[in-house]
Structures are given as C-alpha cells and as structure tokens.
Amino acid sequence: MKQFEVNFDGLVGPTHNYAGLSYGNVASLKNASAASSPKQAAKQGLQKMKALADLGMQQGVLAPQERPDVFALRRLGFSGSDGEVLAQAAKQAPAIFQACCSASSMWTANAATVSPSGDTADRKVHFTPANLTNKFHRSLEPQVTGRILQAVFANPEHFAHHQHLPDNEHFGDEGAANHTRLCSAYGKQGVELFVYGREAFNSDKPQPKKFPARQTLEACQAVARLHQLDDAKVVYALQNPDVIDQGVFHNDVIAVGNQNVLFYHEQAFHNTTEVLAEIKGKFGEDELHFICVDSQDVSVQDAISSYLFNTQILTLPDGSMAIIAPTECEENPAVAAYLRKLVTLNTPIKEVKFFDVKQSMRNGGGPACLRLRVALTEQEYQAVNPHTLMSDQLFKTLNTWVDKHYRDSLLVDDLRDPALLNESRAALDELTQILKLGSVYPFQRV
C-alpha cells in the first residue's frame, strides 16, 4: 500500500503581529513591537506550500486561531461590548492583552503530536493537541486546535483524537516540535523520538538554569501511552540543558529528522552517545544516517539565528531528500558553507532549496515550525478533508481571500481596534467555508 508524508502548514492569521511574547526564543524577543505585514506573511506561507506541492509533495493547510481572543479576555474579567473588552484590556493589562493577540498558532509544529497508523496498536493515526502550558499566549490554543484537527481528519475509522494533556507544567507538552519519527519507509513501523527538557517529578535530574524547559518527560510518556505506541520503538532523549539556556527552546531548533536521517548539532542532546545507540538498537537492521554538525563548523548561535535545524527535510518523489531552508541559511556564511558541503556527503540529502519566510523568522519560527507532519496511507489520505489539501485552485482562492481581508501593515497598537476584530472574524468565517471546517471558532459557536 502506498504511503507518504503530508505537510500541513499553518495559514498565517489576519492579525499576525510581533509582540515578543516568547521568553527563551531569541528571534521573538529581538523583533518585539516591530511593524508586521499580515498580508506578506500569509502569502509567504502560501507560496512555500504551493512550491512544495509543485515538487510533487502532498501538502495541506491548517486554519489559524482567532485573535484577539476576546473570549479569554472575558474569562479574565473584562466586560462590555467586544470593543470595550479590547479597550479595557489594552489599557489596564497591556501584557495580558498582547498575549491574547498572539500570532503563534501559525507554527503548527506546536499544534499536536501525531503518530501514524504504522506505529499504533489500533492501526489508526493518533492526534494529541499540545497544551503549550509554558506560555500563556500559547496555552489559549489547544481547544480550537483540536476542533480544527477533527475537522480536517474527521473519519473515525482512520483517525483517533485525544484531548490535550492536563493544563499543568508537570505535563508541559509542545507537540511535534519535540517529536521526531525515524523509519525506513513512511508505511513501516518506525522509532518515535521524544525529546524533553526536564523531569517534572524529579528535580534532581539535569535541567536548564536560565530559560524554561517547556517539555517534560512525563508529557512525552503520556502521549506515547495515548497513542498506543510500542515501548520497544520509543526513545526518550533529554535535550542538552546548556543549549536550552542558549536559546534553543525546542528540539526542532537544534535537530530534525526524516525517514532514516537524523540531522543534529553535536550539542543537541544530553548523553548523545547513549541516545544514538538506543535509536540504532530500536531502529533495526535497516540503513540509518546520523548527520552530526560540529560546533567548529556551525556554532549554536549560528544555528539559532539561521534556523539551520528548523528546516524541513523532505523525501522527494524520486526518493532523494532535500532540505527546505530559510534564506537566512543562505545569508549566514558558516551555515551556507556547511550546506554546500552537506550535499556532497554520502547521505540521502542531495539538495537544498531556500525559501523567504522572513515574516515568520522575525517572530521566531522557521520553515519546520510552519508545518505539522502526518504520515498517511493512500486510504487514509483519501479520508482527509479534501478542501484542506493544496491545489492550484485552493492556492488561487486563498491568495484572493488574503488580498480581500488582510492588512498590508500592522502595529501592536492596532490590535485594540474593534474594526480589526470584525475584519478578522469576517475573514475566518469565510475561511471555514472555503476549507469546509464547520464552526470551529468560539465566535461561530455562541
């Protein structure tokens, strides 16, 4: 049976803004309060999706969240009309207001953890939305994320959906940003690698000192149980606390994998030798490539600023692999030199393609942040909501939709404008009709 990986990219929302909300994310903090361009950001994302579809990849679209989140502000005691709620919150609690306006749902690598049917005991594709408890602005996302995923993957014969883990730091879960699946082929049972930053119930274990460790071991173990994974095919790896303190807030900023390739920085993991040995032992006899980048070739800071590891590694239709990298990788001399060398080595990676996703990069997310990977059989693919799958027509329709609804420029101060909220809701209401999602947003359900 034919199997392949589908990348579901998050569509950038109409209130895309830079609020610098993510402590521990260097790029996010650096560009706080700069003017953003929602229209340009959305079009950059769509262009990447269409380019990958044109390469022969299966590509999907995930809808954004509604922001500002007026319903969250009402839960926090602000009252009156929507306009009055926005005005009160912006004046009385500007930090909370900005958090409720976050554009972070565009990074769907944090949307959920996905285990394909080849790995699960019931042979269904399992989805668990990430609770994202470490950041208040992201903790607002899981319920709507779950509804969007259920609308895209609706057939219960093929898809199993779980509630996000308890909203507590002990079970802090950041989704696929800390999860990598290694396999000889997408349809075969693989090894699922969960990377965590600390053990919540054992403070004696190593953990970072400066920046928070957002993912816990206990969360990883819970997701593995929910997804009915075989312990003999699961690896739990501790992220190097020192690199977290250097600004590596997720594993996908320092390591990325695809099929039988794990591409990682030498400082990515704590006890790297043991981690790689366990992966190799559980992977089996099939060929496995560990591609380690030395600090002498690329420093951790260069890796962070360029997002070398927040790239996508894709298996192209001809069986070779390509890296989808942000143009920042091309502009960084050390990273560009390394990538030129990489494609000459004896690995499956034969090509690097550069994409301009600067609107996302300035807010702290590269190409890999923008997508959720879902390995599917042909039968499962046919069961996906077809209106969410990229095509020439959908690309044209969504670009027209963006031109109609999105602003060219947006400042943080604009977010208190009730006219922007109404514009955004009109856009999202129309989007749910384009993608045939039903009523997934709170304003559609009251």
Image: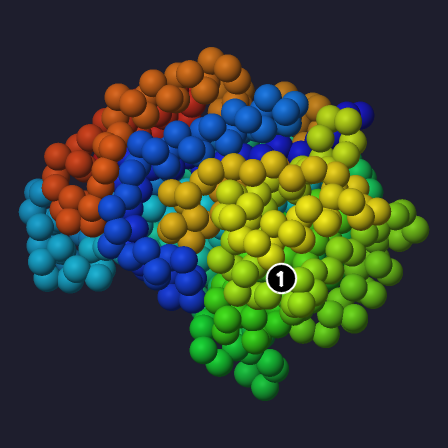
Farthest residue, direction top: 393
Identity of the residue drawn at 53% across and 65% down? 301
Identity of the residue drawn at 29% across and 57% down? 32
Identity of the residue drawn at 84% across and 47% down? 346
Compared to 138, does 343 lie above or below? Answer: above
Q: Quadrant of residue 217?
A: bottom right
**Residue 63 horizontal side relative to residue 240, left or right:** left
Q: Which residue is mark 1?
A: 298
Q: Which image quarter holds the N terminus?
A: top right
Q: Position of residue 196 (x, y in %)?
A: 59, 66
Farthest residue, direction bottom: 204
Compared to 339, does 234 lie above or below? Answer: below
The amino acid on which the numbered mark 1 sits, given as a three-letter code, is Val
Identity of the residue drawn at 34% across and 29% down? 439
Q: Residues within 10 Å of mark 1 (few under 14, many from 20)?
A: many
**Residue 130 horizontal side relative to residue 237, left or right:** left
Q: Between 320 and 88, which is closer to the camera in this rendering?
A: 320
